[in-house]
Image (cartoon, rainbow, N blue to C red):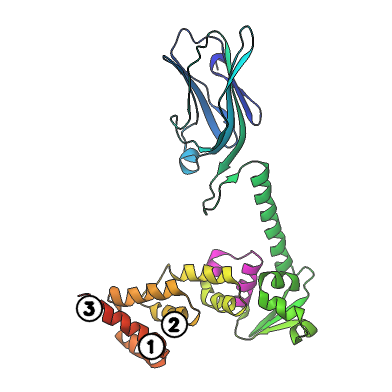
């Protein structure tokens, strides 16, 4: 590797020493690693000097481009040491060699150094949300959260210092008052007042099986698996509504929207009405009426009408009449 193209680095600092640019108009550095990415610096001499900083093209860059905050300087190393400093770049997403270009109109001759001090590097989580730093603040927070969730999961699965018993239809499970109270205002009220749950250190949930209750607790403790969640969505929805766990109710709501079909649409519609899930109700109505699936399940639909609430039946017929008017 030629020294002319080598970039020296520390954890957050990169320096490229250029001894002579007189004999060429373009030079690109060898790749150098800062954070998770390989980077390049390049200089192009025309009427002005263009300095570029960009990540090396890779699957990582395409899928998760860095969001960089940095200060970049050009330092003359001949005679009196002089530095030209670009104003601080904050949260700039860099994907290619045109995303950061610094045009320097001051003529530079002889030796000089391009100095890049990375203040922060962030990525966007696949789940969305605010960009998170890959360095101390973001990484430490993620590691802390992951460790805490693992520890909570062990408290449940290994029965570490459980202090409440949940009795269900076909068994019982130990849990922790503090965790349940922190996740549900209904549980908190049980343990804060002189109710039988506080006195006897038991909770009776007779309408849940032990498998569904285990899934419910696994969600509360941050330990649920995707297949387990899918298998018990309706029981989890019922428990979320009963114990006022809003995030679980919304997770069930979003999941039930994803696989509506002729076999489950009427059941989903009934639950949407019962638990006040507007998006699910709208999607079921559209599936039945706008897409004409109501005619494919006539027998099931007639049976549904015999037991459905009057208000829901009225909504369905309003939807049907509205669709007919559109023809």
Q: Report the residue at 44% width, 74% height from top.
A: 278
The label nearer to you, 3 versus 1, is: 3
Q: Which residue does the numbered mark 1 point to in the structure image?
A: 304
Q: Is residue 202 visible?
A: yes
Give the number of the disc on residue 270. 2
Q: Answer yes or no: is residue 296 visible.
A: no
Q: Residues within 10 Å of mark 3 (few under 14, many from 20)?
A: few
Residue 229 image label? none
Between the C-alphas of marks 3 and 2, the distance is: 25 Å
Disc 1 from disc 2: Cα separation: 9 Å
Which residues lie in the magenta part? Answer: 211-230
Q: Position of residue 87 (x, y in %)?
A: 56, 29
Q: Is label 1 in contact with label 2 (beta carbons under 8 Å)?
A: yes
Q: Are marks 3 and 2 in contact (CB under 8 Å)?
A: no
Q: How many marks?
A: 3
The residue positioned farthest toward the left in the image shown: 327
Answer above or below: position of 215 versus 16.
Answer: below
Residue 226 within the magenta-colored segment of the rendering: yes
Q: Quadrant of residue 260?
A: bottom left
* Residue ID for mark 3: 325
| Residue sitting at the far bottom | 306
Can you say which quadrant of the picture contains the C terminus? bottom left
């Amino acid at each position: 590797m030629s020294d002319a193209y080598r970039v020296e680095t520390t954890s957050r600092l990169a320096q490229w020493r250029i001894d002579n640019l007189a004999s060429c108009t373009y030079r690109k550095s060898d790749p150098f690693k800062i954070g998770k990415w390989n980077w390049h610096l390049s200089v192009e001499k025309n009427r002005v000097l263009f300095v570029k900083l960009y990540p090396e093209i890779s699957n990582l860059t395409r899928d998760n481009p860095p969001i960089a905050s940095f200060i970049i300087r050009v330092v003359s190393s001949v005679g009196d040491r002089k530095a030209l400093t670009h104003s601080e770049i904050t949260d700039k997403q860099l994907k290619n060699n045109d995303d950061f270009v610094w045009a320097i109109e001051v003529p530079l001759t002889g030796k000089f150094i391009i100095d890049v001090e990375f203040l922060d590097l962030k990525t966007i989580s696949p789940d969305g949300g605010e960009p998170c730093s890959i360095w101390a603040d973001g990484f430490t927070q993620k590691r802390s959260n992951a460790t805490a969730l693992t520890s909570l999961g062990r408290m449940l699965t290994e029965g570490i210092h459980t202090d409440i018993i949940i009795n269900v239809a076909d068994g019982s499970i130990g849990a922790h008052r503090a965790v349940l109270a922190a996740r549900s205002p209904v549980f908190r009220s049980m343990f804060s007042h002189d109710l039988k749950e506080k006195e006897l250190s038991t909770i009776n949930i007779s309408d849940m099986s032990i498998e569904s209750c285990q899934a419910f607790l696994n969600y509360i403790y941050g330990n649920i698996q995707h297949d387990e969640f899918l298998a018990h969505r309706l029981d989890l929805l019922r428990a979320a509504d009963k114990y006022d766990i809003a995030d679980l109710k919304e997770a069930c709501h979003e999941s039930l929207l994803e696989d509506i079909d002729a076999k489950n649409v009427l059941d989903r519609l009934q639950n949407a009405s019962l638990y006040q899930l507007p998006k699910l109700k709208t999607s079921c109505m559209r599936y039945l009426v706008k897409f004409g699936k109501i005619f494919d399940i006539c027998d099931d639909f007639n049976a549904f009408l015999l037991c459905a609430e009057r208000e829901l039946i009225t909504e369905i017929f309003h939807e049907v009449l509205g669709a007919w008017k559109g023809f």
